[in-house]
Amino acid sequence: MTGTWLLHVDLDQFFASVEVLRRPELRGRPVIVGGSGDPARPRTVVATASREARAFGVHSGMPMRLAARRCPDAVFLPTDMPAYREASARVMATLRDFPVRVEVWGLDEAFLGGEIADPAALAGELTAALLERTGLTCAIGIGRNKNQAKIAARFAKRDPSGVATLTDESWMPVMGGHPVGDLWGVGPKTVRKLEELGLRTVAELAAADAGTLAARFPPRAAAWLIDIARGGGDTELATEPWVARSRSKEVTYDHDLTDRAAIEERVAALARALTAEVVAEGRRVIRVGVKVRSSSFYTRTREAKLRAGPTTDPEVVAGTARTVLGKFELDRPVRLLGVRADLELEE
């Protein structure tokens, strides 16, 4: 099996697992993390549910109130991003101790690659090291490219060993009968377009030619879809340390906001709080974005670059956020406001 292999490491129920490490008495109990941790508060959603909570049908993105009805005995906890970032840093440091290239894909997942003699054995070593050094478990997918490794990790979550492999040879026997929506990066809109062309399974898409897709997709998108359906994918790894390029804060309000002055003040307060977090990390803000979601779930975003250049001044960021908000008509009741700060890259 010697050759170039890629492994996708996907941490299990990450937020919930970190919370259980901090509170060992919760082990084995259903744990649901989201918002302020209060399931009675309206308009909050589940960020992560433990395996025990998922057995009751609870999943990420579900309203917290519904999660409480499905699993009334669950322990509900607020999200704690600083704790999750700290745990993630320990995970990535552990992965970098192995003789492979590492590309971080967020807090709870990473790709590893290199000339590997026995990828399954390496996966076992990685799993053991993560458990020993961080107390966290993971699923690991193995493939010849990122596409194969990413999808293999989904199968790994259902395998007792926590490891699964997809190769050029096994791809079509395993994936051919799956719906196109099971492909990595293929969302509902793309699925609908493919189904309109009569392409419903991975095998059907893999057998198609670019001309068939030309009526609904640009040439590059058509070629990419056919490539991933055939098991192709990117093999390059960006090994530079992962640095967040933005930070954001958003709030879903218990009651819709209709007064423009109140909305402006809420946006400014979010911007100040966000700037404080950015400054605490030693970063500077270069651009500000504002998100507004109406009571009908219509969501709009606008942004603006800071005129005076990078800043750590919360009032400058708040003022820019107010300016960006001025681009919205605010002709509908507002249920959610968010502010995003794009950050200056560290040298």
Image (cartoon, rainbow, N blue to C red):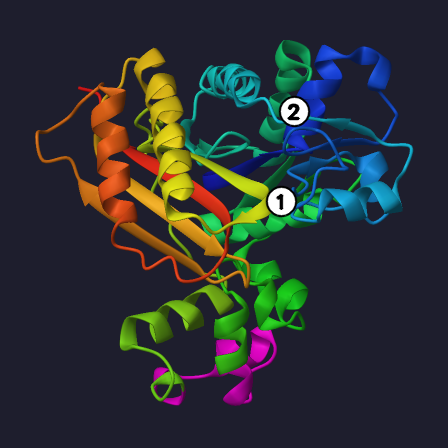
Q: CA separation, marks 1 and 2? A: 13 Å
Residue 77 percent location from the top left of the image:
72, 25
Q: Given the current orientation, which residue lies at the most extreme left position?
A: 308
Pick whichever, 281 or 167, lies toward us: 281
Q: Is residue 202 above or below residue 212?
A: above
Mostly what secondary structure, the magenta segment? helix
Q: Quadrant of residue 41?
A: top right
Query: Considering the image in quadrants, where does the N terminus appear?
Result: top right
Residue at the image point whose x is 56% and y is 81% from the top: 204
Q: Which mark is residue 127?
A: 2
Q: Say left or right for 259 vs 297.
A: left
Residue 238 percent location from the top left of the image:
32, 35
Q: Quadrant of residue 227?
A: bottom left
Q: N-terminal of the two: label 1 or label 2?
A: 2
Residue at the image point whose x is 43% and y is 70% from the top: 225
Q: The residue tagged with tag 1: helix, strand or loop?
A: helix
Pick whichever, 276 or 200, lies toward us: 276
Label 1 neighbour load within 10 Å: few <14, some 14-19, many 20+: many
- The kind of residue on which mark 2 rests is Thr
Residue 308 percent location from the top left of the image:
8, 29
Residue 279 percent location from the top left of the image:
30, 15
Residue at the image point whose x is 55% and y is 64% from the top: 296
Magenta-tinted stretch:
194-212
Q: Which residue is mark 1?
A: 153
- The kind of residue on which mark 1 rests is Ala
Q: The residue tagged with tag 2: helix, strand or loop?
A: helix
> Looking at the image, do the residues carrying marks 1 and 2 touch, with CB atoms under 8 Å apart?
no
Residue at the image point whose x is 88% and y is 26% from the top: 29
Q: Quadrant of residue 52?
A: top right
Query: Considering the image in quadrants, where does the C terminus appear?
Result: top left
Label 2 neighbour load within 10 Å: few <14, some 14-19, many 20+: many
